[in-house]
């Protein structure tokens, strides 16, 4: 080893054993056959000749040829089914609310139609009464005019 002066970095690195060197080396080649860096998904893919008989117990090939744990897949499936059931119940509740709202809307539309028909009937009565009042006022005015002409 070189002697170290104060304030200067060491000029040589300590010697590592082969086992320690192996810890720092990548397990896979840095570039694949195409000369590109392998992606994280590619590193999870089993080799093409990996046979089902050789899978570890409880593991299988999933989508994109990834090795997946059967328990994890079953758990995820169970969670997805529970979520779908929850969504179905939520949709059923919303459908019931929608049906109730549509019945209420239909009832309100009928009430509106009845109120409009009442209003038009009252307006007709009002116009008829106004005409009668006008006719009576004209008759009184004519009687007054005739009474003023007679003496």
Image (spheres, helix red, strand yellow):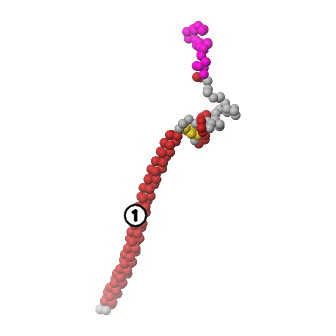
Residue 123 visible somewhere in the drawing: no
State how many labels appear: 1
7 drawn magenta: yes
Main SS of the magenta part reads loop
Location of the C terminus by quadrant is: bottom left
Q: Position of residue 119 (x, y in %)?
A: 38, 73
| Residue 69 as seen in the image, left or right of residue 136 | right
Label 1 sits on a secondary structure element that is helix
Quick one: 9 or 145, which is closer to the camera?
9
Viewer-proximal residue, 22 or 104?
Answer: 22
Residue 25 is at least partly visible in this image: yes
Toward the right, the furthest residue is 34
Spot the residue most to the left.
151
* Quadrant of image for the N terminus: top right
- Tell me: residue 108, above or below residue 49: below
Q: Residue at x 54, y 36 (%)?
A: 57
Q: Residue 45's image quarter? A: top right
Quadrant in which residue 124 is drawn: bottom left
Please rate how many residues cluster around mark 1, counting C-alpha atoms within 10 Å: few if below 14, some from 14 to 19, many from 20.
few
Residue 29 point in image, percent of width and height: 65, 28
Report which residue position mark 1 lands on.
104
Any magenta on residue 79?
A: no
Q: In this orientation, which residue lies closer to the viewer: 115 or 150?
A: 115
| In this view, 26 is above or below 111 | above
Residue at the location (61% across, 27% down)?
27
Q: Is residue 61 left or right of residue 81?
A: right
Which residue occupies 39% across, 71% down? 114
Residue drawn 58% across the image and 7% down it = 3
Magenta span: 1-22
């Amino acid at each position: 080893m070189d002697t170290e002066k104060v304030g200067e970095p060491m000029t040589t690195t300590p010697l590592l054993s082969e086992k320690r060197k192996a810890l720092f080396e990548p397990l896979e080649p840095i570039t694949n056959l195409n000369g590109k860096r392998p992606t994280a998904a590619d590193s999870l893919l089993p080799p093409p000749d990996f046979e089902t008989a050789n899978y570890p117990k409880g593991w299988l090939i999933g989508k994109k040829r990834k090795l997946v744990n059967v328990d994890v897949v079953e758990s995820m499936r169970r969670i997805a089914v529970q979520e779908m059931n929850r969504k179905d119940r939520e949709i059923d509740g919303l459908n019931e609310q929608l049906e109730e709202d549509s019945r209420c809307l239909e009832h309100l539309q009928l009430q509106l139609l009845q109120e409009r028909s009442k209003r038009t009937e009252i307006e007709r009565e009002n116009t008829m009464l106004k005409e009668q009042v006008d006719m009576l006022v004209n008759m009184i005015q004519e009687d007054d005019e005739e009474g003023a002409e007679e003496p």
